[in-house]
Every structure is written in C-alpha cells, then in structure tokens.
Image: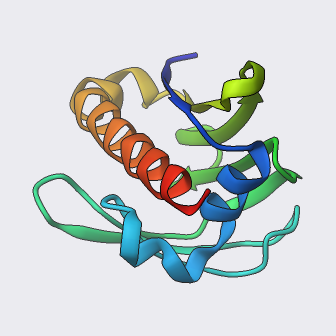
C-alpha cells in the first residue's frame, strides 16, 4: 500500500497542537493547504473541506472521520469514484517527544487498483503540501504557547 509520511518536531504541548489542529475556524489564518473545514469532529461524521493545491487551484472533498483521540490522533478516510478504485486514509498523529514538545506526523495511505498509477502524479505535490502544513502548524502552535 503506497504511503506518504512527514514529521516535524513542535515545541508545544500535545493539547496545544491538538487545539490548533482541530479549531477549524482558524484554518484560513495559518494553514496554507486547507482553506476551510466544516463539520463535527466525531467518528462517523463527514467533514466538508476546501483545500488549495500548491499552484493555487482549490478543490473540495468530504472525508469520513474514522478516529478521534484528543491530543493524540485524528484520522479520516476519503474515497474517489467507488470503493476499491482510489481510496485514501489520512492520519494526524501527535506523539509526545520528551519535555520539549511533540512530534507531529502526517501520514496518508493510498489503496485501490488505481493507486499506483495516480501516485505517480500526486506523490511529489502531496509531500510538498504536507510539509507546508506541518511547518505552518508548528509556527501556529509554538506562537500560542
């Protein structure tokens, strides 16, 4: 199963990183990738997300939340077309990193019979947007301490 994974160390508490990550009204202020998120943060709920690609084009998607562990993990699943064609599961993990803060991990698994083909076109851009978002989250969480 193809996977894209990024990580960044953040000098803030798990609770602060969680607060920034899950307070959706502030996304336009700090997040260069996700323009807006609307919806309830609970397993089984769908979010309405507007994202911006690095070249500036915006697109919408509605993932299903599959896991919420406050100050630790947020996970959602998004399917394109029909099940088994091109599916994605994105996880945001907040891992305590000693007394200095946390390691924030953003990991996306891709599956479905078109995943290997589509990955050739999106891997580099996805990695770039993850890194941009990670750095922006770091700045926002460290500023709010």
Task: Name the foreground residue: 142 vs 35.
Answer: 142
User: Residue 71, relative to residue 19: is it above or below?
Assistant: above
* Residue 17 seen from this side: yes
Q: Residue furthest left?
A: 55
Look at 39% across and 66% down and name the residue there.
30
Look at 58% across and 69% down and name the residue there.
62
Look at 87% across and 53% down and name the residue there.
70
Look at 47% across and 58% down and name the residue there.
140
Judged left or right of residue 30, residue 1 is: right
Marks counted in the figure total 0
Task: Name the foreground residue: 3 vs 18.
Answer: 18
Q: Position of residue 144 (x, y in %)?
A: 56, 62
Q: Position of residue 55 (x, y in %)?
A: 10, 56
Q: Quadrant of residue 105?
A: top right
Judged left or right of residue 126, residue 2 is: right
Q: Quadrant of residue 50?
A: bottom left
């Amino acid at each position: 199963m193809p996977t894209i994974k990024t990580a960044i160390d953040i000098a803030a508490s798990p609770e602060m990183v969680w607060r920034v990550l899950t307070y959706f009204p502030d996304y336009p202020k700090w997040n260069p990738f996700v323009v807006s998120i609307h919806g309830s943060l609970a397993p089984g709920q769908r979010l309405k997300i507007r994202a911006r690609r690095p070249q500036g084009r915006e697109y919408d998607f509605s993932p299903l939340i599959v896991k919420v562990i406050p100050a630790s993990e947020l996970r959602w699943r998004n399917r394109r077309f029909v099940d088994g064609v091109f599916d994605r599961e994105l996880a945001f993990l907040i891992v305590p990193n000693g007394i200095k803060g946390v390691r924030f991990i953003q990991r996306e698994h891709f599956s479905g019979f078109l995943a290997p083909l589509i990955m050739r076109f999106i891997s580099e851009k996805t990695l770039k947007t993850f890194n941009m978002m990670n750095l922006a989250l770091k700045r926002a969480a460290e500023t709010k301490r």
